[in-house]
Image: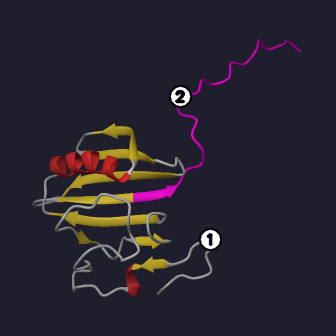
């Protein structure tokens, strides 16, 4: 089922519009319209959890995939490689479930990457890319003046 009629989106990729294996995993590579993010070799796209709006390096949505690398190796890969695509690291939490947050070089998109350990081996990754709502990082909150008694 392809979604249409979304304002400003030139194309939409939805998992049910693609060929999948019996396990619901994509066999090779991301949808052809995906660019501008770090993806490891040998990953398997989870077609049931992936939805992409737009194309090229302007897409938004969620890429869900698994890979036969440890969650620690994936954390290091994403942290190192996203910079090669023009993303600036904003926040990082390395834990049982790790999260990395990046801001695009233009400052108009945010990428959040969630990495969890797979049950047997490898890891699962959810990469969500969304428009930025405007950053207030580094600004001081306004101080309220003294309250007047009524």
| Depth check, front residue: 102 or 2 | 102
Can you say whether 15 is above or below 143 in the image?
A: below
Q: Main secondary structure of the magenta part?
A: loop
Q: Residue furthest right?
A: 150
C-alpha distance separating marks 2 and 1: 31 Å
Residue in the image at 23% along x and 47% along y? 75
Are there few (<14), some (14-19), or many (20+) residues within 10 Å of tag 1?
few
Question: Is 131 part of what is drawn in magenta?
Answer: yes
Are there few (<14), some (14-19), or many (20+) residues within 10 Å of tag 2?
few
* Mark 2 secondary-structure assignment: loop
Examine the image and state in which quarter residue 147 appears. top right
Residue segment shown in magenta: 128-150
Residue in the image at 33% along x and 76% along y? 47
- Disc 2 target residue: 138
The x and y percentages for residue 23 are 22, 81
| Residues under numbered marks 2 and 1 in contact, where contact means CB atoms less than 8 Å apart | no
| Depth check, front residue: 24 or 54 | 54
Residue in the image at 47% along x and 87% along y? 1
Q: Is residue 98 left or right of residue 55?
A: left
- Disc 1 target residue: 8
The x and y percentages for residue 17 are 40, 86
Q: Residue furthest left?
A: 120
């Amino acid at each position: 089922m392809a979604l249409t009629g979304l304002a400003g989106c030139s194309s939409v990729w939805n998992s049910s519009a693609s060929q999948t294996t019996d396990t619901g995993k994509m066999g090779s590579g991301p949808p052809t319209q995906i660019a501008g993010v770090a993806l490891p070799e040998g990953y398997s796209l989870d077609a049931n959890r992936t939805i992409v709006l737009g194309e090229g390096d302007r897409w938004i949505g969620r890429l869900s995939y698994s890979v036969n690398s440890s969650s620690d190796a994936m954390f290091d890969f994403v942290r190192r490689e996203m910079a090669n695509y023009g993303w600036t690291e904003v926040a990082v939490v390395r834990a049982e479930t790790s999260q990395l947050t990046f801001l695009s070089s233009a400052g108009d998109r945010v990428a959040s990457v969630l990495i969890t350990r797979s049950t047997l081996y490898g890891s699962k990754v959810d990469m969500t890319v969304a428009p930025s709502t405007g950053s207030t990082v580094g600004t001081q909150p306004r101080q309220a003046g003294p309250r007047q008694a009524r």
